[in-house]
């Protein structure tokens, strides 16, 4: 039997992920050759700063100054895009590579969230493939699980901890009793949080990933724009303590579900029961729970980011390419993608935790409960702390099931009360069956 030709690969962007990919390809060369039935050869790299990665052995590998030129090199079969950014050079390179008929593997969730459907169309048009296992929860092979392992099922909903930075912050706030800001600073010092943490703590990174997972799980175009996204910046150490007292833990979750032609996708802090398996997934770990009609519930957990887990996911995609596996990008042909109507967050129904800072004076609580009642919100339980006359005291209310739009209106009205000394905070309580 003649030996198959090596698969020729280029890496664009030699940062955390790209550097990790180079290391895996070099260290595991024999293993990969055996698993793929052909060698994987790293033939070219491109990045912004030549000579920066002195820790990598780049001898014998072509250096290409402009990443876009990789798309036009005839001796390259696959381009690994690990530059990042939702547009600019990463998008230009991905488009140029697909248009040249080269397979693209990317870890770039921001780009996919905005342009994923268009890129998938381009891959289809030029009869090549687009792979993105590393873009969501690197150490968890969730895209493969959804697209292949669970392909016999109709998937109705999924949820998960999709951002390791937020999970680390919330875990440490609970463990140490420290404030959001203090834990964030520590996370930045440890390299678990970016210098500009907005994408992570604002919930947007988790939303990018959720939009990708929902597309693959439900066979729909990626719908990131318009998704309800709320981060963890308003969570206080008091919220964490009250949650514990009520039998809950606060997690930033991405939740997505389909029903009767509608899709519900949202990212926000959730209070979940301490008995829920993902309540125990702490620190930088990620977890995804998915529900299928035959398989039931399935939970996957692992490291979501970092050099090793992310490079491992990139190379898993590369193995698929080397083996000649080309699957529909979102699990079904693009012509079969379902157009689903996004659910309005205002219509969401659930239980709510509300924390207020009320002046300790008679009638303050009554004025709050009147507002809640006038917005069709009934109270399940209430905790009132301390007595310091005319000072702000925390009052926590847990509602029965209510409508989100009513809660939002009621909170606005409560904030205008003379007895309301601090802006109220609300966290959605989420129950899983
Ligand atoms: N880090 C993770 O754990 C992780 C996990 C999952 C997904 N991802 C995704 O993977 C991608 C890469 O992330 P990363 O953490 O590896 O980023 P990174 O460490 O900042 O690396 C980015 C690399 O791209 C290079 N680059 C930036 N602009 C460029 C340009 N205009 N032309 C050529 N090269 C350019 C950078 O060069 P310089 O070194 O000169 O700046 C750097 O080598 C992102 O899309 C990210 O969202 C990352």
Image (cartoon, helix red, strand yellow):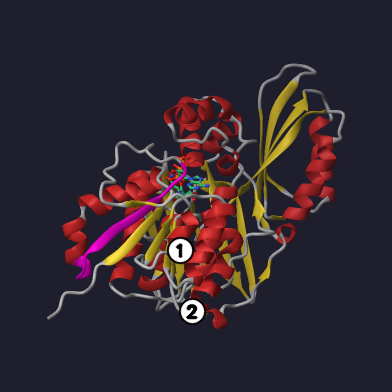
**In this orientation, which residue lies closer to the viewer: 210 or 84?**
84
Image check: 276 left or right of 58? right
Image check: 211 left or right of 75? right
Dot in front, 1 or 2: 1
Label 2 secondary element = loop
Q: CA distance from mark 1 to mark 2?
A: 27 Å
- Crowdedness of circle 1 by 10 Å Cα count: few (<14), some, many (20+)? many
Query: Disc count in the image?
Result: 2
**Contact flag, marks 1 and 2 (Cβ < 8 Å):** no
**In this orientation, which residue lies closer to the viewer: 341 or 240?**
341
**Can residue 57 be seen in this snapshot?**
yes
Q: Indicate the position of residue 295 as horizontal and vertical percent values.
A: 38, 72
Report the residue marked by disc 1: 71
Q: Quadrant of residue 222?
A: bottom right
* Residue 327 lies within the magenta run: no
Instruction: Determine whether 222 is above or below 354 in the image.
Output: below
The quarter of the image holding the N terminus is bottom left
**In this orientation, which residue lies closer to the viewer: 420 or 156?**
156
Report the residue marked by disc 2: 332
């Amino acid at each position: 039997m003649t030996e198959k030709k090596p698969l020729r690969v280029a890496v664009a962007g030699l940062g955390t992920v790209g550097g990790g990919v180079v290391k895996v390809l070099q260290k595991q060369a024999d293993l990969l050759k055996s698993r793929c039935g052909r060698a994987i050869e790293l033939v070219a790299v491109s990045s912004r700063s030549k000579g920066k990665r002195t820790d990598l052995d780049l001898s014998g590998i072509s250096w290409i100054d402009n990443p876009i030129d990789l798309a036009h090199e005839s001796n390259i079969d696959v381009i690994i895009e690990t530059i990042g950014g939702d547009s600019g050079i990463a998008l230009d390179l991905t488009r140029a590579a697909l248009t040249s008929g080269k397979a693209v593997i990317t870890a770039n969730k921001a780009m996919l969230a905005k342009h994923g459907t268009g890129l998938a169309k381009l891959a289809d048009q030029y009869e090549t493939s687009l792979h993105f296992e590393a873009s969501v929860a690197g150490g968890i092979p969730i895209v493969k699980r959804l697209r292949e392992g669970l392909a016999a099922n109709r998937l109705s909903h999924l949820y998960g901890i999709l951002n390791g930075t937020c999970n680390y912050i919330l875990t440490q706030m609970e463990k140490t009793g420290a404030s959001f800001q203090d834990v964030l600073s520590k996370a930045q010092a440890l390299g678990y949080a970016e210098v500009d943490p907005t994408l992570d703590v604002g919930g947007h990174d988790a939303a990018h990933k959720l939009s990708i997972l929902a597309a693959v799980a439900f066979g729909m175009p990626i719908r990131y724009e318009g998704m309800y996204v709320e981060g963890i910046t308003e969570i206080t150490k008091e919220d964490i303590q009250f949650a514990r007292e009520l039998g809950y833990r606060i997690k930033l979750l991405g939740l997505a579900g389909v029903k009767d032609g509608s899709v519900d996708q949202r990212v926000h802090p959730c209070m979940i029961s301490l008995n829920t398996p993902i309540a125990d997934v702490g620190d930088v770990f990620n977890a995804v729970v998915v529900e299928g009609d035959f398989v039931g519930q399935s939970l996957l957990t692992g490291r979501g980011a970092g050099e090793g887990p992310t490079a491992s996911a990139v190379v898993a995609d590369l193995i698929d390419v080397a083996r000649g596996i080309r699957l529909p990008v979102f699990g079904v042909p693009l012509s079969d993608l379902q157009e689903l109507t996004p659910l309005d967050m205002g219509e969401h129904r659930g239980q709510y935790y509300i924390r207020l800072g009320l002046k300790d004076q008679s009638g303050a609580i009554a004025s709050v409960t009147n507002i809640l009642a006038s917005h069709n919100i009934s109270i399940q339980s209430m905790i009132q702390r301390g007595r310091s006359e005319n000072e702000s005291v925390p009052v926590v209310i847990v509602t029965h099931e209510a409508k989100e739009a009513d809660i939002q209106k009621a909170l606005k009205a409560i904030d205008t009360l003379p007895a309301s000394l601090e802006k109220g905070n609300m966290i959605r309580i989420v129950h899983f069956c």
